[in-house]
Image (cartoon, rainbow, N blue to C red):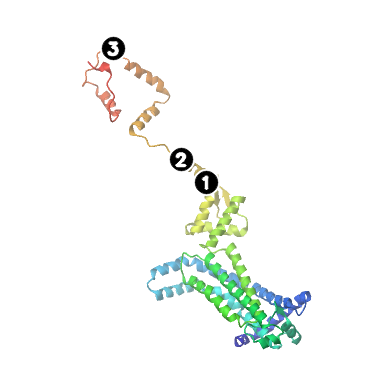
């Protein structure tokens, strides 16, 4: 580790200068020889570095979005060459090259801050040896050697001997307890950060080498830092624990506010957005309007979460517009209510005779009473009138009787028709 740290000795001067400036500030508040002054100086160094790495983090997010946009093409390559792993890998690499996507972009923040990490390790190693380094003079080195965090000197390690720890005026038990707790917290925060990324912010419907890479990092990185942590000074453990907590919070913010399309986080975000629209009747916030605008622009290419969001908006009586806003659509509500009412009020199925009798009643209209009277008068014929002989009925009347005749048992004839 000392050999690797010496490779970054060129950056130890800037790192030591930043620590000294923060120590001057916190030393005036907590005292120059306290662990709070030196510990907070290291924490502030982490915060400053991570702020400077925000543009790189934004680039990482964009690269991850490009990876998500390539998921359908990756799935097509997998299905096409599912029996040829080598050809599948070649086509994947070709796709990365054509689209300018780097599948290792998730490691960029770690690689970028590695020089600062090893430079801080080099500084703390020299402090433990009582040697000056960078802008740290002998007075500052002696002050840092006396600083303790929960009873452990910031330059002490888990693997230090009892004699070396005694030279730093500390107890070996305290050093090992503090370093063990910090190593566990450091590994746990690293694991949780990768786990929430895999479970909430990745489209699990498509399995790609990118997902396998993330899954591998979720288990390998915590193990690496757990093994290497026993060789880190307490100050370096403070540095790495702080950067892990920063990464975890930064990742949680991205998952909640800018989730990956098709992920569980996007589904939860769109549900919150839908509740906000239902409560206020509008999309509040420019960023939220941009998300709705992107969903509308996708059209038929929307994923399941986005289609469900648009359908829920329609049920609530809203229509998403191309500019990301929503409007209250009474037409949509009326059509939805009218369609449901029409489905509820559908009449029962009628028989053939019921439909024929209904057609006659509807065709009579307002002249039904006047048309009914002549028909009754014709039926009231005098008894002495000679009935027409059977079999000589007019053809028209026979057809009319036959068409109106019911199936089944026939009604008996009037007595006057019999001779």
Q: Earlier in the sequence, mark 1 or mark 3?
A: 1
Mark 2 sits on what residue? 344
Kindly tell me whether residue 323 is visible in this rendering.
no
Distance, label 1 to label 3, CA atoms, is 68 Å
User: Where 295 sits versus 97, above or below?
Assistant: above
Neighbours of disc 3 within 10 Å: few (<14), some (14-19), many (20+): few
For the residues labelled 1 and 3, say whether their Cβ atoms are less than 8 Å apart: no
Q: Earlier in the sequence, mark 1 or mark 2?
A: 1
Residue 332 bears which disc, if any? 1
Residue 209 located left or right of residue 245? left
Between 189 and 83, which is closer to the camera in this rendering? 189
Residue at image coords 52%, 54%: 310
Rendered-image quadrant of the C terminus: top left
Mark 3 sits on what residue? 383
Q: Position of residue 252 (x, y in %)?
A: 60, 66
Residue 176, located in which quarter of the rendered image?
A: bottom right
Badge nearest the viewer, 1 or 2: 2
Distance, label 2 to label 3, CA atoms, is 54 Å
Q: Secondary structure at mark 1?
A: helix
Residue 86 bears which disc, if any? none
């Amino acid at each position: 580790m000392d050999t690797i740290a010496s490779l970054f000795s060129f950056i130890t001067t800037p790192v030591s200068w930043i620590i000294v400036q923060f120590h001057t500030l916190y030393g005036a508040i907590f005292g120059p020889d306290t662990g709070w002054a030196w510990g907070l100086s290291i924490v502030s160094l982490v915060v400053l570095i991570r702020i400077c790495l925000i543009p790189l983090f934004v680039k990482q997010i964009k690269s991850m979005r490009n990876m998500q946009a390539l998921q359908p093409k990756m799935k097509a390559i997998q299905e096409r060459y599912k029996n040829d792993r080598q050809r599948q890998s070649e086509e994947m690499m070709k796709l990365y090259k054509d689209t300018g996507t780097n599948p290792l972009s998730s490691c960029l923040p770690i690689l970028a801050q590695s020089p600062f990490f090893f430079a801080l390790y080099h500084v703390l190693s020299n402090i433990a040896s009582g040697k000056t380094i960078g802008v740290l003079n002998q007075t500052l080195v002696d002050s840092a050697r006396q600083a303790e965090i929960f009873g452990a000197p910031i330059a002490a390690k888990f693997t230090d001997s009892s004699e070396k720890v005694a030279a730093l005026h500390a107890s070996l038990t305290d050093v090992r307890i503090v370093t063990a707790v910090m190593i566990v917290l450091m590994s746990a925060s690293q694991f949780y950060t990768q786990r929430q990324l895999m479970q909430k912010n990745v489209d699990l419907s498509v399995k790609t080498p990118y997902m396998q890479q993330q899954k591998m990092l979720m288990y390998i990185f915590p193990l690496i830092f757990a093994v290497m942590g026993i060789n880190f000074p307490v100050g370096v453990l403070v540095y790495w624990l702080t950067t892990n907590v920063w990464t975890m919070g930064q990742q949680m913010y991205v998952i909640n506010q800018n989730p990956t399309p098709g992920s569980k986080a996007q589904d939860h975000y769109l549900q919150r957005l839908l509740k906000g629209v239902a409560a206020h009747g509008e999309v509040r916030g420019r960023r939220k309007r941009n998300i709705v605008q992107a969903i509308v622009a996708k059209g038929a290419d929307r994923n399941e979460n986005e289609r469900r969001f648009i359908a829920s908006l329609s049920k609530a009586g809203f229509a998403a517009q191309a500019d990301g806003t929503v409007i209250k659509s009474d037409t949509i509500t009326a059509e939805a209510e009218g369609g449901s009412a029409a489905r509820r009020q559908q009449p029962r199925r009628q028989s053939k005779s019921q439909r024929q009798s209904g057609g006659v009643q509807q065709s009579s209209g307002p002249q039904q009473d006047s048309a009914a009277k002549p028909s009754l008068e014709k039926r009231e014929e005098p008894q002495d009138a000679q009935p027409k002989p059977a079999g000589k009925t007019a053809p028209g009347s026979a057809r009319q009787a036959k068409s109106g005749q019911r199936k089944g048992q026939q009604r008996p004839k009037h007595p006057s028709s019999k001779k």
